Image (cartoon, grey):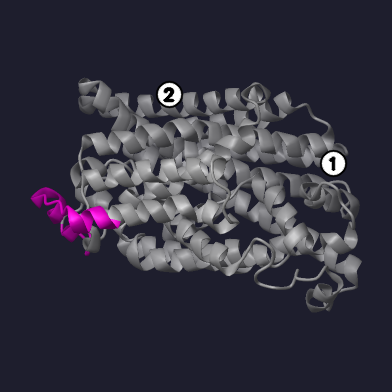
């Protein structure tokens, strides 16, 4: 990287900090900090949802899959998320802001104490929060690794730089800062992605390469299913994506909770679906072309970074790297906001009864402190990653396994069809997912789709069967579920 590249990176970080400081003026209490006061425009919510859905791992892990397997990456990932969001726009997205207006929630798990009971809420809150610290720490380390590849910056300095900037603007500006920086980051990654796309097309001979490339790639790279990425794998991943992107991943639920009403949340979900349908075709094209431009790579996860360095001039390299930072900072800052809301509204009141009667100013201060501590702790995990003996891969897998078991009682609990699934069904479903994951990962050898989908499929089966065999009844829970089918007549301030 040259001087111009560093100027681009520094300018990017300064803009993010400036947005965070400006967003501070819109924060008056914890509801503003965690849900933007329920006033986030649908288009901003949709863009923020899209940007918070993937990190720098796309340019490392997904680049490796594109290099070795080809177009199937788009089918099971981008197209799968698109379908998941279309499903969610009808079933789940509109119910999140209705929960906020009905109960005044600012945390995705807050309603579970009414829908099930406090112990169920606490099991999901504690397990998800603890593992998310390691998940975010892994993302900081992955981003620092990219900076090391591009510029030779030590891992520790990379973590401190990217994590430190995110820590400042997230702590100051809350969800408004997250969403507005997501918008700025969306523009940056749009320009960066199109720049590399055009550079790759020029290298391959122009626009016709869009359809002639596939004949020059290894066999199977143009097929929707290839290798271990079979039809069964795609279908189970569609279930996982449906649960994750519609709120099972807590930071994505926040984007819908912040929408003014159900109609706005539905439009936000549809916008995010459209972006996932179209944008990855541009973003992934250089990754698909890498076997032609960089044949025989021993480390295919470096293909995107190597293409950038070989095809772009000084200044544009910094822009592409800023685009990679954009995805990680968007995801981690929104993670911090969502986790902090769970800590302040779900965990702390359960262990300290007086916390439920905090003043508005005190609750806001507590939210900022929780955000600061979460990001700082995750940075500490990233800085000491080597001492965890491969924590970067292990913890990401464990968090991925927990998405389904946590999301099933969260999301299905909002639907009338599952009203008879109570606290026992929720906790049994969660526990089953963990046990099955441990079995398929460490005890028995199974096909790839079973390893990925086994935990969530078993969790779903247990949740449904217990609801049928041991139906649970609660008038308060039934009234809550019924109220989510339409907009409340009286809106709570949230």
The N terminus sits in image quarter = top right
Please state which of the two labelled residues, at mark 1 or mark 2, is closer to the viewer. 2
Give the labeled residue for mark 2. Answer: 369
Query: Which residue is disc 1 drawn over?
Result: 4
Judge whether 21 appears above or below 249 on screen.
Answer: above
Where is residue 352, by image quadrant? Answer: top left
| Extreme residue toward the front, this view | 444
- In the figure, is residue 322 to the left or right of 343? right
Q: Is residue 467 magenta?
A: yes
Q: Which of the 4 quarters of the picture holds residue 493?
A: top left
Q: Secondary structure at mark 1?
A: helix
Local crowd at mark 1 within 10 Å, few (<14), some, or many (≥20)? some
> Which contiguous range is marked in magenta?
464-489
Q: Along the polypeptide, which appears first: circle 1 or circle 2?
A: 1
- Drawn side of residue 311 relative to residue 459, left or right: right
Residue 39 makes an appearance in the image: no
Q: Residue 325 appears at what percent x and percent y? A: 67, 42
């Amino acid at each position: 990287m040259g001087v111009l590249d560093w100027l681009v990176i520094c300018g990017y970080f300064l803009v993010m900090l400036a947005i965070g400081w400006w967003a501070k003026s819109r924060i008056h209490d914890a509801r503003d900090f965690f849900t933007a006061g329920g006033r986030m425009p649908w288009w901003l919510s949709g863009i923020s949802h899209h940007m918070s859905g993937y990190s720098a791992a796309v340019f490392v892990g997904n680049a490796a899959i594109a290099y070795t397997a080809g177009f199937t990456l788009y089918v099971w990932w981008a197209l799968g998320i698109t379908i998941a969001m279309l499903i969610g726009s009808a079933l789940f997205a509109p119910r999140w802001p209705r929960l906020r207006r009905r109960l005044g929630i600012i945390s995705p798990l807050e309603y579970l104490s009414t829908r099930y009971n406090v112990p169920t809420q606490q099991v999901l809150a504690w397990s998800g929060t603890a593992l998310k610290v390691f998940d975010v720490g892994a993302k900081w380390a992955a981003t620092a690794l990219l900076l090391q590849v591009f510029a030779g910056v030590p891992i520790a300095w990379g973590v401190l730089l990217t994590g430190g900037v995110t820590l400042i603007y997230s702590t100051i500006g809350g969800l408004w800062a997250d969403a507005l920086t997501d918008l700025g980051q969306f523009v940056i990654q749009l320009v960066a992605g199109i720049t590399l796309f055009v550079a790759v097309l020029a290298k391959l001979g122009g626009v016709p390469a869009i359809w002639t490339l596939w004949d020059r790639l290894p066999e199977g790279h143009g097929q929707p299913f290839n290798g271990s990425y079979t039809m069964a794998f795609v279908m189970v991943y569609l279930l996982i994506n449906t649960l994750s992107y519609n709120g099972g991943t807590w930071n994505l639920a926040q984007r819908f909770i912040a929408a003014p009403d159900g109609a706005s949340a539905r439009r936000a979900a549809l916008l995010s679906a459209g972006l996932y349908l179209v944008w990855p075709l541009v973003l992934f094209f250089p990754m698909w072309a890498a076997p032609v431009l960089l044949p025989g790579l021993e480390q295919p996860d470096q293909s995107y970074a190597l293409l950038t360095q070989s095809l772009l001039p000084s200044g544009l390299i910094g822009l592409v790297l800023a685009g990679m930072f954009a995805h990680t900072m968007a995801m981690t800052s929104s993670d911090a906001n969502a986790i902090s809301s769970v800590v302040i509204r779900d965990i702390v009141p359960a262990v300290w009864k007086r916390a439920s009667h905090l003043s508005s100013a005190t609750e806001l201060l507590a939210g900022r402190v929780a955000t600061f501590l979460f990001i700082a702790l995750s940075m500490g995990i990233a800085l000491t990653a080597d001492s965890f003996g491969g924590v970067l891969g292990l913890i990401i897998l464990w968090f991925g396994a927990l998405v389904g078991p946590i999301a099933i009682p969260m999301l299905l609990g909002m639907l009338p069809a599952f009203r008879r699934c109570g606290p026992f069904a929720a906790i049994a479903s969660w526990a089953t997912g963990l046990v099955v994951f441990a079995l398929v990962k460490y005890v028995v050898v199974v096909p790839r789709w079973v390893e990925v989908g086994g935990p969530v499929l078993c969790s779903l089966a247990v949740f449904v069967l217990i609801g049928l065999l041991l139906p649970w009844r609660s008038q308060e829970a039934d009234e809550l579920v019924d109220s989510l089918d339409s907009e409340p007549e009286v809106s709570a301030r949230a």
